[in-house]
Image (cartoon, rainbow, N blue to C red):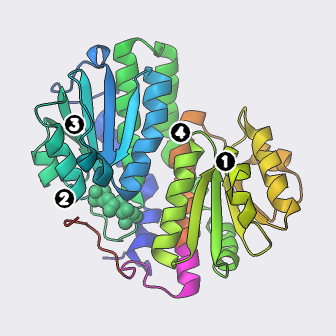
Amino acid sequence: DKAGFKHFMAKEIAEQPTVLADALRGYLNGNTIFLPDTLPDFAKVDRLVMVACGTAYYACLTAKYWFEQIARLPVEVDIASEFRYREPPISKGTVAIFVSQSGETADTLAALRYCKGKAETILSVVNVDQSSIARESDVALPIHAGVEVGVASTKAFTCQLNTLLLLALNAANQRGTISDTDLASTLSNLRALPGLFNAALDRDPVMADAATQIAEARDVLFLGRGLMYPLALEGALKLKEISYIHAEAYASGELKHGPIALIDKTVPVVVMAPRDALFEKTVSNMQEVMARGGRVCLITDAAGAEAAGDDVWRTVVLPEVDPILTPLLYALPAQLLAYHAAVAKGTDVDQPRNLAKSVTVE
Ligand code: M6R
């Protein structure tokens, strides 16, 4: 049931404030995070290995920043189809985490089976509780996103991020790398996030306008730094999946090492950058793009919009948010951009060509 929306994807994007609030209730009571007792004590864990495909892989790349920065835990992230055949050494003391919406992705399941008997704990983060990946794990954490119909993952991505962030905060708490005050303030910011999601969804007309113009491009570049880099990758994947526009993402600092050669007036560049300590560097990246005629669509906050100046082609202003939570909030405009570009191009948004919701063969 599309609940009055034209596409499942539109519905699934729009319901994220409610879905996130529900997902949070599944794990939080006040400032206490409830996770299964069967989880390992992260104070005794040496390292994490995170494995997934597609959007779930980008959720892992995001979580790497959280686990490393907040919990000071080293993390290796890999694509399941690479991991399974590379047969990497897995030491005891390693927790292996598999992230999958469907819980049936063939490569992710094969990677999980490879880690059995090698890793300390096999942990999965899934949307489908009774899936193969959930059943074959020592511990399965549900993301509580509800059924996702659109082939392009939207609410499952934000709910994967939410679950992984809670896990990282819990690990940080056990490892003594976060103070009680910082933990309490992050959790209270997280509880307020569904409200900010609503504000981000209110930017829909601006995103639709930018997307309609971007839909005419043959190539689109996405740039982001730090936590925004995996999100740039996710934004590019979303756009190519449903609008069939060639989109690529780079870490902003890589621009001069190659992709800048692509820039001319036909290549829109989507920059995802809240105003943070490195924002000045992003401004100089944008100037390099604009000097070559590139059109910059900047997704930022009010402070970022002001610092970026007037030459930016389109600026989308999101509410200010706790820096740790930016990937969840900035996912929404990335989804809206892809959605409206696909609608402008008249593609089959919910069932894009050549793609299946769940990839159960390699
Ligand atoms: O069910 P999974 O999360 O294991 O699926 C992984 C990918 O196939 C999936 O995320 C795919 O990339 C989506 N279509 C992205 O929107």
Residue 292 position, x and y percent, is 85, 64
Q: CA distance from mark 2 to mark 4?
A: 28 Å
10 Å crowding of disc 1: few (<14), some (14-19), many (20+): some
In space, the residues marked 3 and 2 are separated at their CA atoms by 15 Å
- Among numbered discs 3 and 2, the one appearing first in the sequence: 2
Q: Earlier in the sequence, mark 4 or mark 3?
A: 3
Residue 94 seen in the figure = yes
Please state, as top left, top right, bottom left or bottom right, where the N terminus lies in the image.
bottom left
Closer to the N terminus: mark 1 or mark 3? 3
Q: Residues within 10 Å of mark 3 (few under 14, many from 20)?
A: many
Instruction: Name the residue tied to disc 1.
Output: 254
Q: Quadrant of residue 203?
A: bottom right
Between marks 2 and 1 in the image, the one whose residue lies nearer the viewer: 1
Q: Are marks 2 and 1 in contact (CB under 8 Å)?
A: no
Give, as a three-letter code, the residue at label 4.
Leu
Tell me the residue at 54%/60% (across/down): 235
Q: Is residue 306 above or below residue 239?
A: above
